[in-house]
Image (spheres, grey):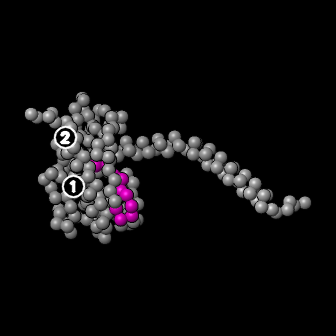
């Protein structure tokens, strides 16, 4: 025979369902936490390798925070050969998380987009080998106008995605400011 439906029975049943679902979510979280962290670390390490010159250290083990950005120094025999700087820029669809690599002299070695929420087929092209990304490689932001041509700069925007291109270049600019700050920190104070 079925139990009579009452407020007390509904509350008890709903509480049990919530308790079971919460326990299941906790188990799934604890099981997937380590693999997710490992995958994220691998993604970061791959981005670092793509944006810095060949190095003999593990930059992710020597990371530091400068100006709110994470910096990964690349070294050969203990000497800095470049930096990978992780920054976020605001794109059309949301934040663009990217890694910008600099040689020790301040020229851009390469860039890598780690994550974004840009429009598929348009702004999402930022992850490919497009002019906005390839035209900045080898340039020094101190002596180059790294803005889109629509704004008087020398970099071609992604077709129909000028906002994404601007955001990407703002991220490069932010990374360069961090690079300049790193250079200041390494310079001995002069009297």
Single out the residue that lies furthest toward the bottom.
Answer: 160
Residue 65 falls left or right of residue 38: left
Determine contact: label 1, label 2, CB under 8 Å. no
Residue 165 falls within the magenta-colored stretch: no
Q: Residues within 10 Å of mark 1 (few under 14, many from 20)?
A: many
Mark 2, Cα crowd under 10 Å, few <14 / some 14-19 / many 20+, is few
Q: Secondary structure at mark 2?
A: helix
Image quadrant for the C terminus?
top left
Q: Position of residue 112 (x, y in %)?
A: 32, 51
Which part of the image, by quadrant, shows the N terminus? bottom right
Q: Main secondary structure of the magenta part?
A: strand
Residue sitting at x 36%, y 34%: 61
Q: Position of residue 69 (x, y in %)?
A: 32, 46
Label 2 belongs to which residue?
183
Between the C-alphas of marks 1 and 2, the distance is: 20 Å
Identify the residue at horizontal 20%, vertical 45% (top origin): 180
Q: Position of residue 166 (x, y in %)?
A: 27, 62
Q: Is residue 189 above or below residue 27?
A: above
Q: Is residue 44 left or right of residue 77?
A: right
Q: Is residue 99 magenta?
A: yes
Question: Magenta residues?
Answer: 91-100
Q: Between 187 and 148, which is closer to the camera in this rendering?
A: 187
Tell me how many marks there are: 2
Judged left or right of residue 50, residue 150 is left
Residue 160 occupies which quadrant of the picture? bottom left
Residue 142 visible within the image: yes
Query: What residue sits right under mark 1 in the picture?
Result: 136
Where 18 sits versus 161, above or below? above
């Amino acid at each position: 025979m079925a139990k009579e439906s009452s407020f007390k029975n509904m509350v008890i049943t709903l509480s049990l369902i919530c308790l079971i679902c919460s326990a299941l979510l906790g188990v799934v979280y604890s099981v997937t936490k380590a693999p997710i962290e490992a995958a994220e670390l691998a993604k970061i390490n791959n981005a670092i390798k793509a944006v810095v010159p060949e190095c003999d250290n593990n930059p992710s083990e020597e990371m530091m925070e400068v100006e709110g950005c994470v910096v990964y120094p690349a070294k050969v025999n203990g000497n800095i050969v470049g930096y990978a700087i992780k920054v976020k820029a605001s794109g059309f669809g949301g934040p663009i998380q990217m890694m910008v690599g600099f040689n020790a002299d301040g020229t851009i070695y390469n860039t890598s987009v780690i994550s974004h929420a840009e429009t598929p087929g348009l702004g999402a092209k930022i992850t490919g080998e497009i002019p906005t990304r390839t035209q900045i490689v080898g340039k020094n932001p101190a002596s180059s106008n790294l803005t889109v041509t629509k704004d008087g700069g020398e970099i071609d925007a992604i077709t129909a995605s000028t906002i994404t291109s601007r955001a990407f270049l703002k991220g490069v600019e932010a990374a360069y400011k961090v690079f300049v700050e790193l250079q200041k920190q390494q310079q001995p104070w002069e009297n």
